[in-house]
Amino acid sequence: MTHARRGQVRGRRILTGALGVAALAALWELYKLLGPAEGVVVGGITLLPRTSDLAMPHVWVMAARAFEPVTGASNAIPLWQAVLEGSLFTLGIAAVGWLAGVTVGLLLALLMQRFRLAESAVLPWIVLSQTVPLIALAPLVRRWGSQIQFGEFTWASWMSVALIASYLAFFPVAVGALRGLASPDANHVDLMHCYAVGWWKTLWRLRLPASIGYLLPALRLAAASAVIGTVVAEVSIGLRGGIGRLIVEYAGAAGGDPGKPWAPIFGSIAVGLVAAGFVALIGLFLRRFRRGEVAA
Amino acid sequence: MNNHPAQPDPALAVEVTGVSRVFTVRKGADVTALDNVSLTVAPGEFVSLIGPSGCGKSTLLRLIADLDTPTAGEIKVFGKAARQARIDQDYGIAFQQAGLLPWRTVAGNIELPLELHGTSRPVRRARAADLIALVGLSDFADKYPDQLSGGMQQRVAIARSLAESPSLLLMDEPFGALDEMTRERMQNELVRICAETRAAVVFVTHSIPEAVFLSDRVVVMSPRPGRIRDVLSVSLGDQAQRGENLREDESFFQGVSRVRELLHGEAPAGARGVETR
Amino acid sequence: MRPGPISGAGLARTALPPVLLGVAAVLLWQWAVVAFEIKSFILPGPFLIGEEFAANLQNVVNGMTVTGRNALIGLLVGAVLGILAAIVAALLRTVDEMGAPIVASIAVVPIVALAPVLYTMFGAGAETARQIVAGLAVFVPVYFNTLKGLRQVRPVHRDLMRSYAATSWQATKTVTLPTALPFVFTGLRIASSLAVISALIAEYFGGPVGGLGKSITSSASGSNYGLAWAYVLGSILLGLLFYAAALGLEKLVSRRTSG
């Protein structure tokens, strides 16, 4: 495919993507127009939502609200600015959590690849770790953190949030990296053996490059998980300054201001997409190692 | 020819006229897989396509099967366009990788084309049982492909290609992945089956002895661009008479030599290994 | 796929290392709690949690039932929608491209963000919001994995179907769907425990009483940390149960994977 053709395809994809979003908005408005006021209730179970302006604000109301000030106070900044600031704050913490999670995940994967016993003993627990509801542990983590003090270093609340984000992020990396490290052909491993190359060199020359194809989707998943974990932990710890806090605050205002709670939702989506985009960018630099990769 | 299942069509089985196939590749240079190739196959005739890699033999087979379209020229199968012949299911095909569906048993795989074309279950079962017996796998009817060896899988693929008693068989190096002993055994089987069914066969191979053993005519092709260099008649007797001993026969060796000469025909002078040390 | 370690000796060999590690970890934990005199509001010992679990078994089971039911409904609806959407997206590339940004957004949206607005949309008295949250969490992995599976058809099988002049539907039924099946199950396995966690987290943001999330909050605010951890244990068990069910279903249905 020539460059021109590739650009054409990308342009078309962006166009159809935008069309999809527009279609969703149109569907929202259509349902709002035609749907019953109390929603579709079947046998006491609400199947489709209520269509009141409070429950389902118009799409343009959501959009317009973003440009109005946050509160009625005279020095209030516009809503979009508040959401932007919150988003950046959350993105920063998520980045720290992602880095920590990726590091731990990689180390675990290396350990499990090196020692078969480690893999059989530890992997099930890694899988199990994700069944623990971290939202229950978040206040606990903060409590633990407050006990930690090394000289100048004190544990800030945001670190608890980052820790929880890393808890969610390490899992896909550990699993994906393990699969990737184990992915080289038996032939290639034998070749390294013939060259009398030790485990570390084999790792650097063979296993790591071979694992890139598996690692990148895992990193992307870890980025999304880190963002989700950050927002959830912000809420349960009550950390100020991030999107999570805004979600809870504005949710309380929903009664009089139906458009308000939607702004931080879009903000958090944007944060997640930016995080995923950043990982995709990393992937661009590693294209040499992805030649064998089959597109999903 | 009165006691065979399929009546050969009076028209030519396969008629390839002036066919070219050019592949446009991403970065610039086009690949001419086939250049103005013409060929006919008579009903009941066994024709092999042989040549080095890149000579277009598999491409030609795929064009006949309507798995691809020529960039120029015309292909007729039993007097119809290739596409129509495919829709009318006038041929059976066997690929180099057996291509069995891993979640179906041997019997299930053989029944596949019959199932797709609406044959009733009892008829399907009976036909599959016949074919399984024909290829000698009666004990394995309920096994899954991953429980079979490569040779057995290929036998199932061949049985499957015969399921609807086609008058034309298209085979793309079906024995390519097998060891020499199994290969020779499969060749004997195939010759026996062809003698019984009287189907025309277009058989792609890169093994000279195989082509000579199996065929009535051998089509020698050359690469870059894919062309037919020559067509050789290898009359080694009626298919029903080709047996084990044929491989030891003088006429067999002569046939092999002639094909080999044709294949190496355009070697540059001195390349025949004259050492001047 | 060869039958996995279902035989006795094989099972023991697979299960032994993690079990041993787990037992060792629990014992170490209990020792640490006792030796360092860690207060229960920081970290209760495993034995205390076990006691509370046993003492409040009925309540924990009740909570598991409520959360479990929401998770199950979310799992079923989300999985069905995910599979259908993937089939449509595999058939119509336009739909795939139109849906891409939306699905990508669902994949990154924190459930927390949606819970409050969903309660407003569906009413705070209904369990629907929680089920939708679980359903959305399930939809994403099922959709992506199913879509991937639907694109895995081997070229030789595709040629085979074409040589049989099979209709699209015949080709789909005979080759595409069976090839995709293992991928669907991978998605379901991932989705199964996600459904539980999502249903639980949604409980933190409102809705009717009942469910493990609510119970964890109420016991934590009542300073009964051992009990709170017992509920956490209940949620882990629930997640395991769902995962095991998904795994069991997979083993039951698929005898041969595409190979």
Image (cartoon, coloured by chain):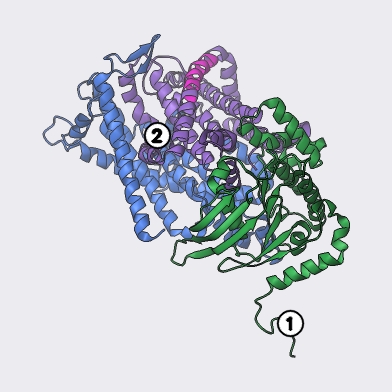
Chain colours: A blue, B green, C purple
Q: Residue at x 40, y 34 (%)?
A: A233
Name the element at disc 2.
Answer: helix
Question: Label 2: how many residues lie within 10 Å, few (<14), some (14-19) or many (20+)?
Answer: many
Give the residue furthest to the top.
A43
Residue tagged by mark 2?
A: A233
Residue B96 left/right relative to C78: right
Q: Nearer the viewer, mark 1 or mark 2?
A: 1
Residue B229: x %, y % from top left = 63, 69
Q: Quadrant of residue A254?
A: top left
Residue tagged by mark 1?
A: B273
Is B247 above or below relative to B97?
below
Q: Residue at x 68, y 50 (%)?
A: B43
Q: Chain letter of disc 1?
A: B
Residue B41: x %, y % from top left = 65, 55
Residue A168 left/right relative to B155: left
Q: Quadrant of residue B126?
A: top right
Which region shows up in magenta?
A: C60-75
The disc at residue B254 is: none
| Three-letter amino acid code at the position of disc 2 | Ala
Residue C66 in sight here:
yes
Give the residue furthest to the left.
A74
Q: Residue at x 46, y 58 (%)?
A: A286
Residue A249 in sight here:
no
Q: Nearer the viewer, residue A151 or B227?
A: B227
| Three-letter amino acid code at the position of disc 1 | Gly
Is B83 above or below relative to A201?
above
User: Is residue B135 highlighted in magenta?
Assistant: no
Residue B47: x %, y % from top left = 69, 57
Residue B151 left/right relative to A238: right
Q: Name the quadrant of the N terminus of chain A.
A: bottom left
Our reading of the magenta stretch's main secondary structure is helix
